[in-house]
Image (cartoon, coloured by chain):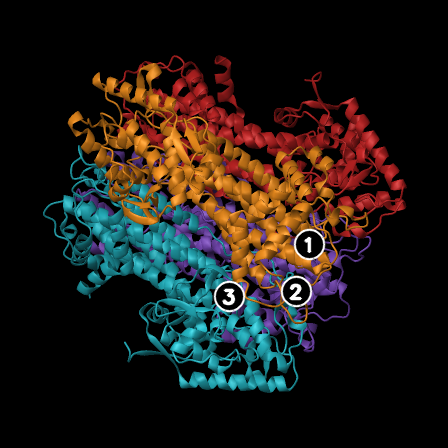
Chain colours: A red, B orange, C cyan, D purple
Amino acid sequence: MDKEKLILNGQDLTIEDVTRVAKEGLKVEISPEAMVRLEETRKFVFDLADKGLPIYGFTTGVGVNKDKRVFEAYFEQYNRNLIYAHCVAVEPEATEENTRAIVLARLNTFLVGRTGIQPAVAAMYKEFLNHGIHPVIPERGSVGQADISCLSHIGLAVMGEGDVYYRGTKMPAGEAMKMAGLNPVVLGPKDGLAIVSSSAHSSGPGALVLQEIRELVETANIVYALSLEGFDGNVTPLDEKVNEIRKMPGQIHCAAQVRKYLDGSYLNKKSITKSVQDPLSFRDACAVHGAVLDSLEHVWKYLTIQLNTSDDNPCVLPEQDRIISCQNFEVANWAIGFEMMGIALSHLSKVCSHRTMRMAEPVFTKLSRFLTPSEGDILGFSTVQKTFTSLDTEIRHLSNPATADYFSVSLNMEDHANNTPYVVKKTGQIVDILRYIIGIEAMHGAQAVDLREDINLGKGTKAAYDVIREEIPYYDNDRVLTTDFKAAYELVKSGRILDAVRKVIN
Amino acid sequence: MDKEKLILNGQDLTIEDVTRVAKEGLKVEISPEAMVRLEETRKFVFDLADKGLPIYGFTTGVGVNKDKRVFEAYFEQYNRNLIYAHCVAVEPEATEENTRAIVLARLNTFLVGRTGIQPAVAAMYKEFLNHGIHPVIPERGSVGQADISCLSHIGLAVMGEGDVYYRGTKMPAGEAMKMAGLNPVVLGPKDGLAIVSSSAHSSGPGALVLQEIRELVETANIVYALSLEGFDGNVTPLDEKVNEIRKMPGQIHCAAQVRKYLDGSYLNKKSITKSVQDPLSFRDACAVHGAVLDSLEHVWKYLTIQLNTSDDNPCVLPEQDRIISCQNFEVANWAIGFEMMGIALSHLSKVCSHRTMRMAEPVFTKLSRFLTPSEGDILGFSTVQKTFTSLDTEIRHLSNPATADYFSVSLNMEDHANNTPYVVKKTGQIVDILRYIIGIEAMHGAQAVDLREDINLGKGTKAAYDVIREEIPYYDNDRVLTTDFKAAYELVKSGRILDAVRKVIN
Amino acid sequence: MDKEKLILNGQDLTIEDVTRVAKEGLKVEISPEAMVRLEETRKFVFDLADKGLPIYGFTTGVGVNKDKRVFEAYFEQYNRNLIYAHCVAVEPEATEENTRAIVLARLNTFLVGRTGIQPAVAAMYKEFLNHGIHPVIPERGSVGQADISCLSHIGLAVMGEGDVYYRGTKMPAGEAMKMAGLNPVVLGPKDGLAIVSSSAHSSGPGALVLQEIRELVETANIVYALSLEGFDGNVTPLDEKVNEIRKMPGQIHCAAQVRKYLDGSYLNKKSITKSVQDPLSFRDACAVHGAVLDSLEHVWKYLTIQLNTSDDNPCVLPEQDRIISCQNFEVANWAIGFEMMGIALSHLSKVCSHRTMRMAEPVFTKLSRFLTPSEGDILGFSTVQKTFTSLDTEIRHLSNPATADYFSVSLNMEDHANNTPYVVKKTGQIVDILRYIIGIEAMHGAQAVDLREDINLGKGTKAAYDVIREEIPYYDNDRVLTTDFKAAYELVKSGRILDAVRKVIN
Amino acid sequence: MDKEKLILNGQDLTIEDVTRVAKEGLKVEISPEAMVRLEETRKFVFDLADKGLPIYGFTTGVGVNKDKRVFEAYFEQYNRNLIYAHCVAVEPEATEENTRAIVLARLNTFLVGRTGIQPAVAAMYKEFLNHGIHPVIPERGSVGQADISCLSHIGLAVMGEGDVYYRGTKMPAGEAMKMAGLNPVVLGPKDGLAIVSSSAHSSGPGALVLQEIRELVETANIVYALSLEGFDGNVTPLDEKVNEIRKMPGQIHCAAQVRKYLDGSYLNKKSITKSVQDPLSFRDACAVHGAVLDSLEHVWKYLTIQLNTSDDNPCVLPEQDRIISCQNFEVANWAIGFEMMGIALSHLSKVCSHRTMRMAEPVFTKLSRFLTPSEGDILGFSTVQKTFTSLDTEIRHLSNPATADYFSVSLNMEDHANNTPYVVKKTGQIVDILRYIIGIEAMHGAQAVDLREDINLGKGTKAAYDVIREEIPYYDNDRVLTTDFKAAYELVKSGRILDAVRKVIN
């Protein structure tokens, strides 16, 4: 790990990179070209200021105070105060993973070179990531029109103030930096504004959520394949040709994956006498899961742009010899895209839940009611239906839109907003709840498979089945299921099901 | 017009085509190759049936009755009954424009050649379009998992039953066909299922709505440009370079359009002493309008696929010598896309409304309160704020999702749905309300321009201003505004503002 | 009818009265005491004005123009302009029934005597009602913080301007008044404000909706009772004692009604060997229907207060010798109550729909699948499930809240709103859709009853069954159901089912 | 405290009592009469079973297994298994306060005497409360149609299994009971069903939430009064007479409270020359706050019934010599009421937020922008607007309904649900967020008061001001506000503001 480092240049940070830095601790470097860009822009800004022109957030105040002049003697104090005055976010604290994603996202957009920030600030962000110094950022307080009220808390740490997490402990920033051999940065002109004026509080965690969705859909495909075996379902809807005719990319992709998982399965040998059609939650699975992927594709595209472009205001344009007011902090397109993701995921929740219910119905499966090993004595997966039903209700509720609900603030100067941090967060909550729902489907799939005898599972589903049964035993008698649900959730969340299957599928 | 005809082949129908056929009466032809395809598929299906294999919806019943056999002697009766039993939609009737779009959408997907339908049925759809015979289709009743309960009503007309609109009059289908020299088609095997098993009731009207959105955003850009002149706003956020840096395609497109509209405007000559930053509804306009376009791009792509691919079930595969159960009627990806459109449009509504409010505020405009010509005596655009506020509330309400709210029906066989017709409809309603909101913004823009003296408008905005003032006079005294609002709405809806500006902009 | 007149005094108007005047054409009188009150208040206001004190909306402008003085010479012109400037509502037009309810609601609150209005205006409202002159009121445009933008349109008519409906024809107000022998009123001071400053545009139609809900629930109880017979359901949940123990008033009321309807039914003679428990949509019916009544009770109470109290601002207080600014136009409590009604009705929709689905399931009913007369040949009530499912989706969508979504308008002077007209309207739409859903349940109930042999219906359900079968024949073969659904809807809407049952139940 | 005990009899438990037991540790007793009732019912059930009649959940299985017979020899095992099979709830754990409320609510409804439960179980619930033994109840998993999947976890503890919290530590139930000198109960027939079949998981915490709302509104009234002083607002809307005329009880109550708080305030001495009307968030405050109270009144009534009536199924009716299936677990009326509360509270959030924004606007207050002590240098309460705006967005989102979103489960036997636990929880979350919003308003009110000189505060507002200033100093320079917001939140949550004011107001 130590040798591998991610080189940041403001141009090609991927969503997968964000996950690796945030969750796996990958270290980062700033590319020399990017550092040069930072220094040149910084110099340009100072030169321009020397000409006596008012520069927003540099020689002037910000927001409605843009008509106030800031004098050189007060640069440091002004920027410190600016950071203070923007520290208005409230609990809960962002997780350390999210904080890393935030710091990374902001660092990379610094490197686009349109802020005029002091290079030492960018360097400190890099140090924070590489030393694992994670500023405490209260999570709520931004309306997503640049996350100024949250990102300010990173600024505090850069100055050696406020608290950070370091080596598992919450401590004053100054103390952690000392331990790590770092010196606080003295803020200069425009640094305050550059630190806060970005959507990194949304885009960083947003990148983590998108990556999680991609993995969730792949896991859902695996679990669906296992359920199909448990259900003794029809494989014709997975046929390559028939999906190709439909031309929908997500559907084609999912059907191809599922065919792979079912390679070798008894289902492929079934004669034509099978039930002509299965319930839609089974039959349409690839189209619905694929719709989630098609939706994801859309957001993924714009969030990737976001991570590699300037979201600063004002924008420093050395090529035009000026700094201008702009709209580059506006994130409506991907904020709205996240709303769509929530709705798409609510459909995923529906089909997973319905498959789980169908597996409990003898009329479809010819197995026992609620997949009990003994209909007379053992209740089986009966009350469980309340569990995932209530979880699906939460998802449906979370899928309601929130981006367009805002007040016009700052004396009507700020009359648009997207609530991006909240929208990203609720999408992440949906993902998390779905882990339970998919985990519970997996428990049903495995149980149904167990209740059938002499069936061959597919190459992928066999691997999935095995990893499930490592953690969750066959349901042979009524037992407290809370623990099993937690285990199933962890199997999905940790990626263990995914890893096991990927290992056997090329 | 008579000479021009659209050739349909099941492969390259565009969303613009649907508008031209549905709204402008463009006539259609079926390409010879497509006709051959229909005939071959039809023959294949009969051959297969001769082998005695059960074919869903051909020699078997449909839905949960798929286990019942249909014998040759009853093909006609069975298919007539199938049409009857699916005629369960309820009021209101689809508009004739929507009906044309529906018939066209279904006709083109027939031509993909995966249904096995009797070619005479497809030909009759063509005749309906070309003669202007429009079956009465009650609009509500489909959950969007194939619009079987609505499309059946076209089947009625094909058989010469039920009612149609013809030459402006509602009359029995048989009567209209007689007048037009057409003979009813006797349905044969699989015709009933092929007629109803499609999402054309959603995709046809959906295409019209998407086209309307494209035009609406372009109009919104024009009106925004006019408002900016009325507001005496800042043009730096429109700068080509600064938008290019941001890389978001919709934003770049909108900014380029607005720069063209403002070509020659007094705004471009303003000195640096201007207000550094405008309210976000002005400053971020291109990013927000552009977000609507970015969202539109997504849905447009998948709906175009939908119009040119088979959404039938089962799917006829002569290349594999079989007919198989599939998921090709599942439309989740673009149904969910329409939900996103509603949310995106709700943001458009917000920024238009806020710009309108800001124009009424002297603190920003240095003009009179509510743009009144005389603050003491005349109320001006004061109460108006209730009008568009209440309309925006409707849009916000309509923007709530609905796709995932369905019952599991048909004894749990149909346990997924998308409510596509309703989602398309509510999106269309949002578009319609926005016409008022944009029209009212236009009235404010023109009024603000009038209140300024000696200003030069841009090339595009001048054209827009002129067409507005043709219909709506300067507000020189308090008057009933209901009529003016209607006129403004019509200006937007008819495309007159758009046309006027396009004429002067290359 | 002609002899009976409703005496209005501003104190005891009931919700039932509003229905009778609005829908049945009942004529009205103003009580002499109320007329005296109007005259005295009017005199008081003039006296106060003579003292030279500024009186909001009388000697001053309104809204943010409250700081402008209006001089006596301009009273007429000022008030005419005020009416004009508030005529900003847009289509569609209110129905004539709703218009009558609006005029009545405003007339009665005039009589509370807190406006200072010219008595001739109140008298004209009475004439409008009694002559059937119905001002054209565009429906949309009020945010429900006094419906000033809509009620203004009545003011137009009072002055003899704008359009009205009279004897089924739309015509200029002046013309209709001439035909009816009425002379336009010349507005004096404060008349403009008094005309517009009220929530009558919401409370009048709201009263009609509440009355419709009361009747809908009663009809739902009848239809449930019939369904229970068709279902061969369990009557123990209707037991008097067991409901009494629960103490919930709505549930107790509904169970008592249903017991009456089932008086004499074969269900009461069933032995103990019956299925121990029915699905919740049957078992919990009285509790869920009763919850709608409990919710209704809440809104009914506050709307009744609304109809009989002053919602004017400012409030004229002769007893204190002053006129003061107040909050009496604020209608949050019942606006929020209407939101609850929508949610309550969405539950009613669910249980009706589920009962309808359960009746189609042989596993519960021991009858045929989809209640078909012949499982092999006839599809029966199969596709129908899409119809009511899609209608329920609309109800679910409409049940989303809208009251709190508003802009802060009028330069932030009006920073609260309730969107009452829209909320009332969407609640009315829910009621209307439910008529279809309950009508379709009734069709299922009757069909199931027909499929059983030798059963005795209850006294009430027999009457309901008969009136249903008068319009909708037994489903003996597949047929187009659109017409039957319309008939079922009309049976519910017209109150014919209700009337038939009430006749036989004391 | 030790001497005072709450006597429970199943008849008169109040919502205040629940708070005292759950939050303040009040101990409980079971009244002797209630104990006798329990014993008699128990005996009756055994007698009935001796007659060989099938009794649901006693000698039969539950749910869809109601057709299975349970034999005497297996009573213990069957009931243990029933508890196990219902333990399907998932994280997070209920708080100890909520757990106490749940146990209390279930205990009191046992005492109604309709379950046939073994008296020792009820006694153990009492012991748990009095010893502070709090079973771990995972919070999610119930759809609110009896909270069977959650309440089962109490059953575990009663048997001495599973975990509990005791003296601040999580430990095995058996261990804690041993420490407390208690012996596990051996479950007998019907005990399992009686333990789980109740809505106590919703009603207990629901009672706490309702009490919190009552206190929140009172606090909001105090803070509003302080804001009004900071705003230099108009007191005429508080006038006793003018509110009495309106007749709305909540409004009258709130206005009376606010008048008391302002007793002695400089506002009462203002001359008539004041601004005629304030923004609606100030002017309508009592009507909007009062609407919350009117809504609360509704839910309060039905939840109080809930706490004192049987919500069991089946219902034991010794007076009729039978046990019957019923609908008494259906909680639709108050579940729907909680939905209304959320919407009502979203309005409270709006008016608090708007008042806070208005206080920052010099055009209204004649004070400095954002209440800064120095417009040039200090930003003041500027960025703060993002904080409460984003919090209000969360409230708006949480206020969306969720009760009617459920699956039909258990093979369609359970086709209605209310999602009561989730609805109660989201209402509680709204309350919690509002504490921030009201706290931030309070900070603005106090700051505005400080910026005015020589003003006398009212008796109540002075007390509130003082307690605020004890924790949060005057904003004299830009500083990190996160800590102050937390302090303000705690002031509201702890009731300290309320207590301080109540002390000086009689």
Callout 2, which amino acid? Thr
Quarter placement of the C terminus of chain B: top right
Q: Is residue A108 above or below residue B274?
A: above
Q: For the residues tagged 3 and 2, is the chain the same?
A: no
The image quadrant of residue C408 is bottom right
Residue under pointer 2 = B372
Q: Secondary structure at mark 1?
A: helix
Point out the tag, 1 or 2, that comes first from the N-terminus.
1
Dot 3 falls on which chain? C
Q: Nearer the viewer, residue D59 or A44?
A: A44
- Cα–Cα span, label 1 and label 3: 30 Å
Q: Residue at x 28, y 53 (%)?
A: C489
Quarter placement of the N terminus of chain B: top left
Dot 1 falls on which chain? B
Residue under pointer 1 = B230
Q: For the residues tagged 1 and 2, is the chain the same?
A: yes
Work out whether residue B179 can be spotted.
yes
- The percent position of residue B121, horizontal first and vertical second, equals 29, 31
Q: Is residue D494 above or below residue B241?
A: below
- Looking at the rendered structure, which numbered label has been put on residue C147? 3
